[in-house]
Image (tube, rainbow, N blue to C red):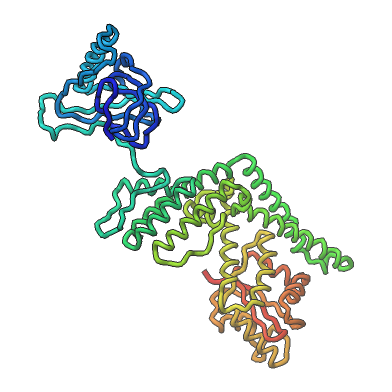
């Protein structure tokens, strides 16, 4: 909206939204109330004085409204004559002379491209000085097209929670500029949900044509936030408290495992038959202690000690948002929610040479990861029954807790074990040798197992796998065989209450 100063008649461009606020003329410094329309009478608050000396150095913009803007003019127009109501007054003549001089100074400053000050006031009368750079026609050029915009920057009409302007209607001609994409990315990595949500909503309005662009922006945002997550996790992990805690957990497990192995490898029937039950009880207590210590160590290694950290959990919520939006951009259903340990595992996979949980214990890192992989494999095979997996888990929990690598279930050894359990059940015998005189090694070879079989366990008292395991566990020779450090493969077979287990080492 264009108004004229009520004192010097200088044309001033103002924002209609500033109606009712106090403002000052850029030329004569007169103070008045900004009208709601160009035809409305302007209320004068202060006639004005000589304006402050022009500022040469650029000062930063302030955001205090209103900012009054002078429109560009192709040529200099002398200021209008100011009519002072008290005609003949000496003071009036003096004001007129001063105003004319000030207008001339102002014109010079505009032509010279120097800085000018625009002052405004708020409802409380507080003065705000805004320094603006005025661009004018270059010296020696008279073409109107050579003139630059009056103000260096125009205020954006975008709301602070709007990533970019959407056309109405959205047609095939609309494209996202690089500036729009950059602004959308800044919104996506923002800590404010409202800003991120505005991007989600905007791209859903844009529809299928922009899904590929959306996916790229989400992937970029996720990568940036993953770096931030890693930095924060590293800071927590490398803290003295956490590092000391991990080191203590590691040492505590090592001590418990060492004590447990000594007792497990003892032949109690031979050493102290009279106190066999008491010794087995003490042995089991030691093994249980090692199991508990290993669980604590494994939890710390996988980062589960950070699950109560609010800052890290905020990252989890953010990544779940990204996963949902990425799935939508690909036309897929939303994936299963991720948890904190999933993100930590992702970082570990990206940087296999570091230990996120703290310390540089590469050996224990490899040990934990190897066992986790084997246990996951055993649980996911589709040719092993639930009972087989239950028995195998019991055995592997003991091995891992005592520092031995878990046994991986082998299909060929399992076939050999099932064949022998079936023979014993249907032929009604109970022996390591078959009717044809073949040994467990022969049966394993016939089933296609490539490697060495170290031993075979048999049981026929119950269909319960835990009963079978316990029977072997309290038998000195079989318990020691279970923990043979050279073994890495196992086969399990059952026919009714007949159980067969073969353990060995798969060929390299």
| Location of residue 134 by image quarter | top left
Of 415 and 379, nearer the camera is 379
| Location of residue 46 by image quarter | top left
Of 98 and 223, nearer the camera is 98
- Residue at the spot 45% in from the left edge and 50% down from the top edge: 196
Looking at the picture, how far across and down is residue 169, in whole percent? 30, 57
Looking at the picture, how far across and down is residue 369, in whole percent? 57, 59
- Residue lying at the far right in this picture: please name it: 274
Looking at the picture, how far across and down is residue 340, in whole percent? 56, 54
32 sits left or right of 241 in the view: left
- Residue at the spot 44% in from the left edge and 23% down from the top edge: 126
Q: Is residue 59 something one can see in this rendering?
A: no
Of 414 and 248, nearer the camera is 248
66 sits left or right of 442 in the view: left
- Residue lying at the far top in this picture: please name it: 90
The number of discs equals 0
User: Please, is residue 426 above or below residue 408 in the view?
Assistant: below
Indicate the quadrant containing the N terminus: top left, top right, bottom left or bottom right: top left
């Amino acid at each position: 909206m264009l108004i004229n100063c009520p004192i010097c008649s200088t044309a001033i461009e103002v924002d209609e939204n500033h109606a009712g606020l106090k403002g000052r003329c850029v030329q004569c410094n007169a103070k008045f109330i900004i009208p709601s329309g160009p035809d409305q009478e302007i209320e004068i608050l202060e006639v004005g004085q000589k304006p402050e000396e022009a500022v040469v150095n650029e000062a930063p913009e302030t955001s205090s409204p209103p900012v009054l803007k002078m429109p560009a003019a192709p040529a200099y127009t002398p200021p209008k004559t100011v009519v002072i109501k008290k005609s003949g007054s000496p003071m009036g003549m003096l004001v007129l002379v001063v105003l004319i001089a000030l207008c001339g100074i102002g014109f010079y400053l505009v032509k010279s491209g120097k800085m000018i000050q625009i002052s405004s006031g708020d409802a409380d009368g507080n003065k705000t000085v805004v320094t603006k750079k005025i661009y004018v026609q270059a010296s020696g050029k008279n073409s109107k097209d050579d003139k630059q915009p009056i103000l260096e920057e125009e205020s954006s009409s975008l709301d602070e929670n709007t990533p970019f302007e959407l056309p109405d209607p959205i047609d095939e001609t609309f494209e996202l500029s690089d500036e729009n994409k950059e602004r959308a990315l800044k919104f996506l990595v923002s800590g404010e949900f409202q800003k991120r949500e505005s991007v989600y909503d905007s791209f859903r309005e844009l529809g299928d044509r922009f899904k590929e662009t959306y996916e790229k922006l989400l992937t970029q945002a996720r990568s940036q936030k993953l770096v931030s997550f890693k930095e924060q996790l590293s800071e927590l992990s490398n803290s003295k408290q956490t590092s000391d805690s991990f080191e203590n957990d590691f040492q505590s497990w090592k001590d418990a495992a060492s004590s447990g192995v000594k007792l497990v490898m003892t032949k109690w029937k031979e050493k102290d038959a009279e106190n066999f039950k008491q010794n087995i009880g003490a042995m089991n207590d030691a093994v249980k202690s090692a199991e508990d210590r290993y669980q604590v160590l494994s939890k710390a290694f996988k980062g589960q000690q950070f699950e109560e950290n609010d800052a890290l959990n905020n990252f989890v919520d953010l990544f779940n948002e990204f996963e949902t939006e990425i799935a939508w951009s690909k036309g897929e259903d939303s994936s299963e929610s991720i948890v904190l340990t999933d993100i930590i595992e992702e970082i570990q996979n990206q940087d296999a040479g570091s230990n996120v949980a703290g310390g540089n214990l590469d050996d224990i890192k490899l040990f934990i990861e190897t066992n986790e992989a084997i246990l996951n494999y055993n649980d996911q095979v589709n040719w092993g029954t639930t009972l087989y997996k239950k028995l195998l888990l019991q055995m592997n929990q003991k091995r891992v807790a005592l520092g031995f690598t878990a046994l991986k279930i082998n299909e060929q050894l399992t076939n050999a074990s099932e064949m022998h359990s079936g023979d014993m059940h249907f032929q009604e015998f109970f022996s390591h040798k078959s009717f044809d005189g073949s040994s467990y090694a022969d049966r394993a070879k016939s089933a296609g197992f490539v490697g060495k079989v170290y031993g075979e366990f048999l049981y026929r008292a119950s269909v319960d796998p835990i009963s079978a395991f316990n029977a072997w566990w309290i038998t000195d020779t079989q318990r020691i065989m279970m923990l043979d450090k050279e073994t890495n493969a196992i086969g399990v077979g059952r026919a009714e209450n007949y159980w067969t287990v073969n353990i060995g080492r798969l060929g390299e």
